[in-house]
Amino acid sequence: MEIDSKSSYIQAIKLVQQKQFARANMIFQSLIKNNVTDEQIIYYYGYSLIELNEYEQALKLYRQYLSINSKEYQLLRAFCYAKMGFIDKAVNDWIKLAKDGDPTANYLLLDLKKSKDNKAFVTFLKYKNACPPLPSVSTKPPVFLTAFKRLKPLSNKRSEKKLIKNHSSGKNTTLVFVVLSIIVILLGCLFIVVFQKNDNLENPAKSNIETTKEVVRNGADKTNTSKHNIESIYLYENKKAIEKDLEKGKKYLSVQDYNNALFIFNKIIYSNADEKYKRKCENLSLLLSEPLFNKLSFNPIFNEVIQNPLLYSNLFVQWKGLVFELKDELTFSIMVYSKNPIYIDGIAICKLPNSFPLFVKQQIEIFGKIISVIDGNTPEILIKNIRVLYE
C-alpha cells in the first residue's frame, strides 16, 4: 500500500470507528481499485456495508475478492445469508464448518437450536459473534516515516562511542529480561501441573467425566471404538446399586424392550463398575432383538442424546424432521423437531442402506439406530425405515 493510500486507509478506519460508515465506504471504494489484494481493506469495506444493512453488496464483495474455500469467507457468507433471510443456506455453511472443527460455527448452531424463533435468532445475530475478527490496524503514521524523523546523524567519534555503549547496555538488559521471563513461565507451568494433579486426586469423578467429554467431543464415541478405553461417566456408590441396575436390565431383556435394556447396559458399561459387570452387560446386549417401527416403549429425544451420547449409543430413535441436505444417494441430513417444524431441535445425519427418493424440505419421520454423535451435537443415525409425512 502506497503512502497516499495508507493515509486514506487510516482516515477510513477512523470514520469506521466513529460509525460514519457511508463516508468510510466512499474511501474504501477508491482504495480497493488500486489495492485489490489487500484483505484489510476488503474486510473493513465489507464490515461497513454490513453496518449499512447492504448485505447483498457485502456478499458480492467477499465473493469477488476472497478465497471461496477459506473459513473466513464461508463465515461471512453465512452471516450475510442469515441477515438476508436465507437461514437454510446459512445453516448449510455452518454445518460444513462445524464438521471441520470451526468453533464459531459450532456455537452458532447450538444457539440456533436453543432459539425457539429463527427470526429472533437472526435479529440478535451480531457480526462479532458470527464473523471472523477484523484485522488489527494502527491509525498512527507508517512506522518507517516516524522512525526516519527520529534519526539524527552522528558527527563525531564521541557520539559513536556513546551509541555503542548504549547498545551494549540495552542488549544486556534485554538478555536479563528474557532469562527472567523464561524462569517465571517455567515456574508457572510447574505450578499448574502440580495443581491439576492434586485436583484430579481429590476429585477423581470430576476428572473421569471431563476425560470422557473430551473423548466424545473428538468423535471417539463411534460404535467401533473399544468401550473399555473410555473412562466412566457414571459413578455407582456400591456393588448393590450396580447389581440392582443389572437386574433391571435383565427384566427389560426378558420382554425384549430393546431401548430400556440397552440404556441400562450402557450405563453400567460406561461407569466405575468392575470389568466383570461390564463384560456381562456387553454379552447380554448381544441377545437383544432390534425393535420395529412404531414399537418403541422408550424413544429418546434429541437433547437427551447429545447431552449423554455414550448412554444412548446403539439405541433406536423415531424422530420427525425436515430434509435439510442431500449429500449423496445414501446420506442426507434432517432438521429434527419435537412438536412443530418451526422449532428445530437440531441437525441429524442419516445413513441409508439403500437409495430412497427424497427432496429438500420434505417432512418425514425416520426410524433408526444411533451409531455416533459427531462433535457432540450432531447424531448420526443408521436408517431402518422412513415414513413420508407430507410431500
Image: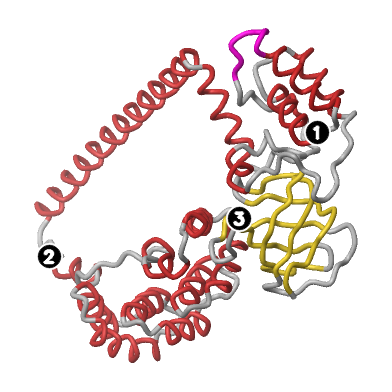
Q: Is residue 18 left or right of residue 252?
A: left
> Which of the pair 177/57 is nearer the observer?
57
Residue 283 in the magenta stretch? The answer is no
Q: CA distance from mark 3 to mark 2?
A: 75 Å
The N terminus - image quarter: bottom left
Q: Which residue is mark 3?
A: 338
User: How many labels were placed on the picture?
Assistant: 3
> Which of the pair 4/381 is nearer the observer?
381
**Helix, strand or loop for disc 3:** loop
Vertical placement of 160 versus 239: above or below? below
- Residue at the spot 58% in from the left edge and 62% down from the top edge: 340
Give amino acid for label 2: Lys
Q: CA distance from mark 1 to mark 3?
A: 23 Å
- Residue 16, disc: none
Mark closest to the chain's N terminus, 1 or 2: 2
**Magenta-drawn segment:** 235-241
Residue 194 is situated, as x and y percent measured from the top left of the image, at 43, 18
**Helix, strand or loop for disc 1:** loop
Mark closest to the chain's N terminus, 1 or 3: 1
- Residue at the spot 82% in from the left edge and 25% down from the top edge: 282
Q: Say which quarter of the image contains residue 288.
A: top right
- Residue 257, disc: 1
> Which of the pair 92/298 is nearer the observer?
298
| Label 1 neighbour load within 10 Å: few <14, some 14-19, many 20+ | many
- Residue at the spot 57% in from the left edge and 72% down from the top edge: 88
Q: Nearer the viewer, mark 3 or mark 2?
A: 3
Q: CA distance from mark 1 to mark 2?
A: 88 Å
| Label 2 neighbour load within 10 Å: few <14, some 14-19, many 20+ | few
Q: Which residue is mark 2?
A: 152
Give amino acid for label 1: Asp
